[in-house]
C-alpha cells in the first residue's frame, strides 16, 4: 500500500476561518492543504455587502473572500476541491485520517472550519418552490425580483441586512418576523425601520408557500391570534439562521445542543490534534472578524501542539 505523506495540517472548509488559517499556516511554512467541497468563500461569498470588516468600509462579500483566497494562495496555500466524508481521529500512525470523495490524507492536526448552511422554515411548499420564488441568497437571486413585491423571513442580522440589499431590486420588501422585536444590530434595524420600501409584519410565521409554477401567495399565521391570512408576493427570501456543517464530524467530538463544536479558548476540541474555528464552533458572536480571529488563534495552538507532540521521544 502506498505510504501517505504525513501533513502538518488539513484545513476543512474554505470560508473566512479556513482561508485565514490557510494564510497563517502557509506563512508558518507548515505542510498544509485546504479541502473545500465547493468554491472557497463560504457564506460570505453570497453576502451582498460587508460594512463591518475593519479596513474595508465599502466591499462586497465575494470581493472580500476573493481577496482572502488570493492572499492565502499567494502565500503558498494549496486548495483542493474535495468533499470530506469522514475524519478518523488517531487512525493513522502519528496522525488523524481525513477521507474525502477522492483521497485520503494523514495529518498531525486537523482544523474543522466548515461553517454552516441556511436553515429552512420547514413549511408546506418551501422545497417545491426552491428556485421558483423561494431563495436563501439575496446576492444570487435578488436581480430576478426587479420591481416585484417580495417577503423576507427572519429578524436577525442576515434578514435585515439582506432585506435592505433587496430594496435595490424589489418595489416592496416585507419583513415577516415571528416576534414584535428584531434581533438584528441596532444600526441596521434603524435603517430598515425607516426605509420607504420596507414594511413589517410582526408576530407572524409562514405556514405555507403557494403558487402553481412560481410563488404567488403565502399563508401567514399570527402567533398571538392564530389568525391565518393570505399575503400576495412574487418571491420569498428566508434568513432564519443556520445549521452547522458537521455531517462528517465523528460523534466523539463534543458538540453543544444545537450541534456546534465545543472548543476551548485555544480552539482545541476534546480530541487532541483536532481543532475547530469560525461559525462551526459553539459561541455567541458569529462575525467574519471573529471567524478570522478564531483561525489565527487555532494556528498558533496547532503549531504548539505539533511541535510538542511530535518531539523526538514521542515520534514513533
Ligand atoms: P440569527 O441571528 O439566529 O437570527 C435568526 C432569525 O430567524 C431570528 O430573528 C429568529 O427569530 C428567526 N427564526 C429562527 N427560526 C425561525 C423559524 N422557524 N421561523 C421564523 N423565524 C425564525 O441568524 P442570522 O441573522 O443568520 O445571524 C447568524 C449569526 O451571524 C449571528 O450571530 C449574526 O449576528 C451574524 N451575522 C452578522 C452579520 C454582520 O455582522 N454584518 C451579518 C449576518 C449575520 P427570533 O429572533 O425570535 O429568535
Image (spheres, rainbow, N blue to C red):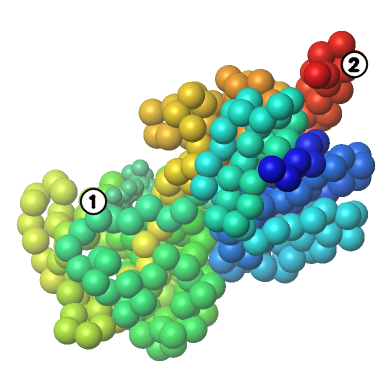
Please provide percent x and percent y for residue 205.
22, 55
- Mark 2–mark 1 Cα distance, whole angstroms, equals 63 Å
Residue displayed at 74% across by 25% down: 94
Q: Residues within 10 Å of mark 2 (few under 14, many from 20)?
A: few
Please provide percent x and percent y for residue 137.
47, 68
Please provide percent x and percent y for residue 250.
49, 32
**Which residue is outermost to the top?**
313
Residue displayed at 49% across by 83% down: 143
In this rendering, the count of numbered labels is 2
Residue displayed at 46% across by 59% down: 160
Residue where numbered disc 1 is placed? 203
Q: Is residue 56 at all visible to an observer of this figure? A: no
207 sits left or right of 92 in the view: left
Residue where numbered disc 2 is placed? 312
Please identify the quarter of the rendering in which residue 30 is found: top right
Please provide percent x and percent y for residue 281.
56, 34
Q: Is residue 111 above or below residue 100?
A: above
Q: Is residue 309 above or below residue 116?
A: above
**Quadrant of the rendering where the N terminus is positioned:** top right
Does the beta carbon of the residue at mark 2 sit less than 8 Å from ligand 1?
Answer: no
Residue 39 vs residue 120, the one in the foreground: 39
Please identify the quarter of the rendering in which residue 276 is found: top right
Amino acid at each position: 500500500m502506498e505510504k501517505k505523506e504525513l501533513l502538518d495540517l488539513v484545513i476543512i472548509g474554505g470560508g473566512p476561518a479556513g482561508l485565514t488559517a490557510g494564510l497563517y499556516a502557509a506563512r508558518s511554512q507548515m505542510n498544509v492543504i485546504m479541502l473545500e467541497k465547493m468554491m472557497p468563500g463560504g457564506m460570505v461569498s453570497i453576502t451582498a455587502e460587508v460594512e463591518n470588516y475593519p479596513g474595508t468600509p465599502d466591499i462586497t462579500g465575494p470581493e472580500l473572500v476573493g481577496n482572502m483566497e488570493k492572499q492565502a494562495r499567494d502565500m503558498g496555500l494549496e486548495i483542493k476541491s474535495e468533499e470530506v466524508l469522514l475524519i478518523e481521529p488517531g487512525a493513522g500512525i502519528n496522525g488523524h485520517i481525513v477521507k474525502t470523495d477522492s483521497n485520503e490524507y494523514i495529518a498531525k492536526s486537523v482544523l474543522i472550519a466548515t461553517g454552516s448552511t441556511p436553515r429552512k422554515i420547514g413549511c408546506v411548499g418551501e422545497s417545491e418552490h426552491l428556485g421558483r420564488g423561494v431563495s436563501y441568497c439575496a446576492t444570487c437571486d435578488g436581480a430576478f425580483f426587479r420591481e416585484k413585491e417580495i417577503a423576507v423571513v427572519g429578524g436577525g442580522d442576515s434578514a435585515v441586512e439582506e432585506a435592505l440589499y433587496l430594496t435595490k431590486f424589489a418595489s416592496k420588501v416585507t419583513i415577516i418576523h415571528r416576534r414584535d422585536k428584531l434581533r438584528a444590530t441596532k444600526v441596521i434595524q434603524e435603517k430598515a425601520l425607516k426605509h420607504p420600501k420596507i414594511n413589517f409584519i410582526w408576530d407572524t410565521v409562514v405556514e405555507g408557500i403557494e403558487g402553481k409554477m412560481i410563488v404567488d401567495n403565502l399563508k401567514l399565521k399570527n402567533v398571538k391570534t392564530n389568525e391565518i391570512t393570505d399575503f400576495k408576493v412574487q418571491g420569498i427570501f428566508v434568513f432564519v439562521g443556520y445549521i452547522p456543517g458537521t455531517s462528517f464530524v465523528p460523534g466523539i467530538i463534543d458538540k453543544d445542543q444545537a450541534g456546534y463544536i465545543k472548543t476551548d479558548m485555544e480552539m482545541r476540541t476534546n480530541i487532541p490534534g483536532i481543532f475547530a474555528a469560525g461559525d462551526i464552533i459553539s459561541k455567541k458572536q458569529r462575525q467574519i472578524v471573529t471567524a478570522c480571529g478564531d483561525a489565527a488563534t487555532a494556528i498558533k495552538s496547532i503549531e504548539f501542539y505539533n511541535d510538542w507532540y511530535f518531539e523526538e521521544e514521542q515520534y514513533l
